[in-house]
Image: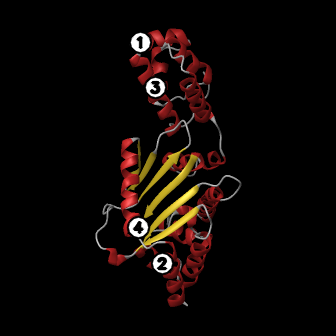
Amino acid sequence: MPNEQAFTLRAQWLGQQLREMRETAKLTLKEVGDFVKRNPSTVSRIESGMLPARVPEVLAYLDICGVDDRKRRDDLKTMSEDAWQKGWWDGFSSDVAASLIDWIWLESRAAEIYSFQVGVLPGLLQTRDYAEALIRAAHVDVGEEQIARFVELRMTRQQRLDGDDPVRLCAIIEEGALRRLVGGPEVMLAQLAHLREVARHRHVEILVLPADAGAHASPNGAFDVFRMRPPYPFAGCISTPAGTLVVEGDKAEALLQKYDRLRGVALQEKATLAFLADMEARLE
């Protein structure tokens, strides 16, 4: 039996597809297991996402379920390859929660990210000093080496904004997050300057939601929406005190509609740049 990986979002999505395909074909776990040469309990673990299916197992599933559609077969093959694919983030898997690894994988696969932030700035837009100040405040019980690992992880994530095929990032930041002096005035001055610089990139849009906008479409807080590359669905991430909640499909589309309503009341690009410049001047 191959070594099992961590229970990941990739494996869950793949397992869900396989289970739905088996149920549509009205096959039992045993019938599929006999065909793919796995026992029923292992097939159940594959379908629950506890064990990612290998490509040969996925192809066998498709065969026994009578699925001939070429796109469907290619999509599931891609999902299987991704479920077992190693990325740079796996080097940090022993340091952070599995939900954060899933989040980073979503960033790596997304074509577009829509982020609404309330208390802090989006991780993809943080300077190193700002990120370190946040991490130190949140993790008072860890040593210097671990702090450095957390900071390095956040900085490495920002590579998605560079290169030949950068992700398109659209971020709305509530005014209160910008007025919070994370790390002190000097750190915030550098952070505000960084936001103004990054906001001039073609593939980045940064907007400020001013306090005088009043009540808005997301009173319960921050969220991110990922427009994924095929064959994956829209995905949304909502941060909660108990961890990250991941939604997909219609629920993720609903978050995107909420983002659009927030965008309608936020300061637009020129006004946002002026707002950030004014904040810098006040801090200076």
Label 3 neighbour load within 10 Å: few <14, some 14-19, many 20+: many
Q: Are marks 2 and 4 in contact (CB under 8 Å)?
A: no
Disc on res. 118: 4
Residue at left offset 54%, top offset 16%: 68
Point out residue 184 in the picture as x, y percentages from the top left corner.
Answer: 53, 82
Residue on which the image places disc 1: 27
Q: Is residue 154 left or right of residue 207?
A: right
* Residue type beneath disc 2: Ala
Residue at left offset 52%, top offset 33%: 11
Point out residue 146 in the picture as x, y percentages from the top left corner.
Answer: 60, 60
Residue at left offset 40%, top offset 60%: 222
* Residue type beneath disc 3: Glu
Of 60 and 252, nearer the camera is: 252
Point out residue 120 in the picture as x, y percentages from the top left corner.
Answer: 46, 68
Determine the CA span between mark 1 and mark 2: 59 Å
Q: Is residue 5 positioned above or below 176 on the image?
A: above
Q: Is residue 207 left or right of residue 1?
A: left
Q: Are marks 3 and 1 in contact (CB under 8 Å)?
A: no
Determine the CA span between mark 3 and mark 1: 13 Å
In which quadrant of the rendered image does the N terminus lie? top right
> Is label 1 or label 2 in front?
2
Q: Which circle's residue, 2 or 4, is located before the other in the chain?
A: 4
Residue on which the image places disc 3: 47
Residue on which the image places disc 2: 271
Q: Which circle's residue, 1 or 2, is located before the other in the chain?
A: 1
* Residue type beneath disc 4: Val
Q: Look at the image and tell me whether residue 142 can be seen.
A: no
Q: Which circle's residue, 4 or 3, is located before the other in the chain?
A: 3
